[in-house]
């Protein structure tokens, strides 16, 4: 039996373990933490074929510069002389073009639709209840400028074969009549879905361990050993792990891991925040994205999770309360009934999204080592793309035809 070593126990690493184990591999997952606080636990739980526009897209540079002067803004790049940040920023600016966005749309659509289908297969295969619901996602907007942008995106989505519908404010109110709305209109992406990520992660870990996958917590990789064009083992402080195939799936920590093998995988961590309101004043059934505020609102297990912001900079454990206040203050502008209190620091979750400079994930085999794969860089859509990413990595190691074209996601594109 062939053996795979996966570095990283986030949702990407765990789904890679799931598909490798399912196809007959012996699997070890090496996780530097205890699996309780990675980026997958606190996110908005959205599965989003609607997100076919990469983060690096036209207008983001100009918008980002404006937002830098607002401490409560949705997107912020902390000015720094950090060499990695400067290099990442230059690549981001180069990628933020109409041509890049158009070239990326079909590939992002294909991998997202694949992933959504795989979530349904996974639910049936494992019988894990993680609140998977096909109710779509509502993109709510308040201004004519954003309405024009969203109408344009609906047209693009329809041309890509995605199920999307423009709604007037009144049509939107009829979907959830108990909830008061103050909006100009909305787009209902019927192609999207949502879940409860906390239940997904707990269920997935339990299922994998019951299936024979060995998950090693508090196990940090400090060295990657290789012989010519093949990785032979990885070393932790206490032990060497040998295998036939290796996967770097360390989220925002992936660049440092990849450097152990002499690889350049440009990423910057994008800190996001979320908090969950239990027993909300009004029940919500359809998740929403507040367009101007860039805030996600998701019903989960009888509660509602609010999340947002993208704070690009070094990894740090500081909670920027102004970012959290920005989320809190934006919600009643769309949902007047939701008068939220600023949560205490202990009730605020934060995590680091791994952001590539072109807004596309890295998925596939390394050009340098024939048995080393990279699976990271998914930014805000890691949970959404996790099953597809895991399946594509398994297909690569099993020398099977890829379920979708992975050319856009080649991990060696910045080597």
Image (spheres, rainbow, N blue to C red):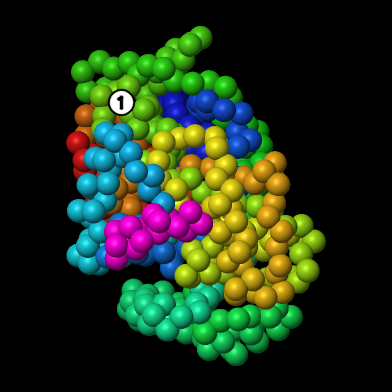
Residue 204 picture quarter: top right
| Image x and y of residue 16, in percent | 46, 40
Asked if residue 70 is among those painted magenta in the image, a careful observer would answer yes
Is 133 displayed left or right of 358 in the figure? right
Q: Give above or below for 246 relative to 173.
A: above
Is 79 displayed left or right of 227 in the figure? right
| Image x and y of residue 151, in percent | 39, 82
Farthest residue in the top direction?
238
Which of the image's four quarters has the C terminus?
top left
- Indicate the secondary structure of the residue bearing disc 1: helix
Q: Give above or below for 210 relative to 391.
A: above
Q: Residues within 10 Å of mark 1 (few under 14, many from 20)?
A: few
Q: Give above or below for 126 relative to 325.
A: above
Which of the image's four quarters has the N terminus?
top left
* Residue at image point 50% right, 66% down: 293
Q: Is residue 312 visible?
A: yes
| Image x and y of residue 312, in percent | 40, 45
Residue 282 picture quarter: bottom right
Residue 326 picture quarter: bottom right
Q: Give above or below for 7 relative to 130.
A: above
Is 22 displayed left or right of 400 in the figure? right
| Image x and y of residue 121, in percent | 55, 56
Report the magenta residues as a range: 59-75
* Residue at image point 48% right, 70% down: 291
In-front residue for pair 128/286: 286
* Residue at image point 64% right, 85% down: 173
Q: Can residue 165 be seen in this view?
A: no
Asked if residue 77 is among those painted magenta in the image, a careful observer would answer no
Is 334 displayed left or right of 49 in the figure? right
* Residue at image point 63% right, 35% down: 36
Q: Label 1 belongs to which residue?
A: 259
């Amino acid at each position: 039996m062939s053996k795979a070593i996966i570095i990283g126990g986030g949702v990407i690493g765990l789904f890679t373990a799931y598909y490798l184990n399912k196809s007959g591999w012996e699997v070890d997952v090496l996780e530097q933490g205890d699996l309780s606080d990675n980026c997958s636990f606190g996110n908005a739980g959205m599965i989003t074929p609607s997100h076919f526009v990469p983060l690096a897209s036209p207008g983001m540079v100009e918008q980002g510069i404006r937002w830098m002067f607002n401490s409560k803004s949705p997107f912020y790049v902390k000015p720094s002389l950090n060499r990695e940040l400067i290099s990442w920023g230059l690549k981001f600016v180069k990628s933020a073009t109409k041509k890049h966005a158009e070239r990326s749309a079909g590939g992002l659509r294909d991998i997202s639709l694949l992933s959504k289908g795989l979530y349904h297969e996974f639910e049936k295969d494992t019988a894990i209840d993680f609140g998977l619901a096909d109710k779509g996602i509502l993109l709510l907007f308040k201004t004519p400028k954003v309405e024009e942008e969203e109408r344009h995106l609906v047209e693009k989505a329809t041309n890509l074969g995605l199920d999307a519908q423009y709604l007037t404010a009144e049509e939107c109110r009829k979907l959830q009549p108990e909830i008061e709305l103050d909006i100009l209109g909305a787009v209902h992406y019927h192609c999207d879905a949502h879940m409860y990520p906390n239940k997904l992660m707990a269920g997935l870990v339990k299922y994998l361990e019951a299936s024979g996958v060995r998950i090693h917590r508090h196990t940090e990789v400090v060295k990657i050993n290789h012989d010519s064009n093949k990785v032979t083992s990885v070393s932790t402080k206490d032990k060497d792990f040998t295998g036939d195939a290796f996967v770097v799936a360390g989220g925002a920590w992936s660049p440092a891991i990849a450097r152990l093998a002499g690889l350049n995988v440009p990423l910057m961590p994008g800190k996001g925040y979320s908090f969950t309101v239990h027993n909300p004043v009004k029940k919500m059934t359809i998740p929403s994205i507040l367009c101007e505020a860039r805030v996600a609102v998701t019903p989960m297990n009888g509660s509602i999770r609010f999340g947002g912001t993208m704070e690009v900079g070094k990894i740090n454990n500081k909670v920027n309360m102004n970012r959290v206040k920005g989320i809190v203050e934006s919600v009643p502008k769309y949902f007047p009934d939701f008068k939220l209190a600023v949560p205490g620091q202990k009730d605020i979750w934060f995590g680091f999204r791994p952001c590539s400079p072109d807004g596309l994930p890295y998925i596939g085999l390394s050009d340098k080592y024939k048995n080393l794969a990279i699976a990271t860089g998914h930014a805000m859509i890691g949970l959404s793309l996790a099953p597809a990413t895991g399946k594509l990595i398994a297909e690569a190691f099993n020398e099977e035809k890829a379920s979708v074209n992975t050319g856009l996601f080649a991990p060696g594109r910045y080597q």
